[in-house]
Image: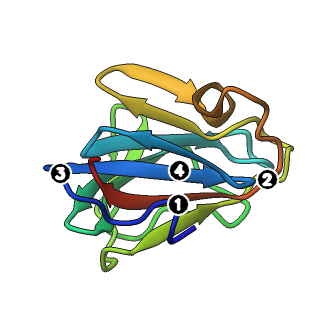
Amino acid sequence: MAAACAQRGGSGVSLCLVSAGVVKTLSIAAFTLMWTHSVEKVDWQEDWRITGARLELVQARVKGSGAGMEPPPEARLIDGWFRWQPKRAAMPEVVLGNSGAAGEWRLCHDGNCRTLSDIFGHPVGTDLTTMKACNNP
């Protein structure tokens, strides 16, 4: 993956997605990652931004609790969502797995949401997908 999503010359940053050897580059600096919990069937959302060569989790939201998905004590219920700011260092990459029991990961930017299968142009299924910051070409 390092070669496929290598840092290249150019300005700005992008999000590189890698699944089953296929690389997709999205020219975005911030996005929301959404999914449905496989047991509770409750929606989760996370707001991410690209900071340098890392991915920073800015805010998390969940529409309920249970089955290992309890919001932390600092979460506040606002408009039906428990919201909080995770205390986590920015990461060089994030690996997304899918059990196939709850639908697909959805990535949203500027009010437009797409499944990973839509982004890749073929079914992603249960293949692992890696998210990583990369420079615009």
Amino acid type for the residue under numbered disc 3: Gly
Of circles 2 and 3, which is in front? Answer: 3
Badge 1 is on which residue? 4
Which residue is at the front of the view, 63 or 127? 127
Badge 4 is on which residue? 17
Which residue of the protein is positioned furthest toward the top in this rendering?
A: 112
The alpha-carbon separation of the residues under discs 3 and 1 comes to 16 Å
Mark 3 vs mark 1: which is more N-terminal?
1
Mark 4 vs mark 3: which is more N-terminal?
3
Mark 1 vs mark 4: which is more N-terminal?
1
Of circles 1 and 4, which is in front? Answer: 1
Q: Secondary structure at mark 2?
A: loop
Q: Is residue 125 above or below residue 18?
A: above
Of circles 4 and 3, which is in front? Answer: 3
Image position of 65 (left or right of 61): right
Image position of 136 (left or right of 25): left
Amino acid type for the residue under numbered disc 2: Asp
Badge 2 is on which residue? 127
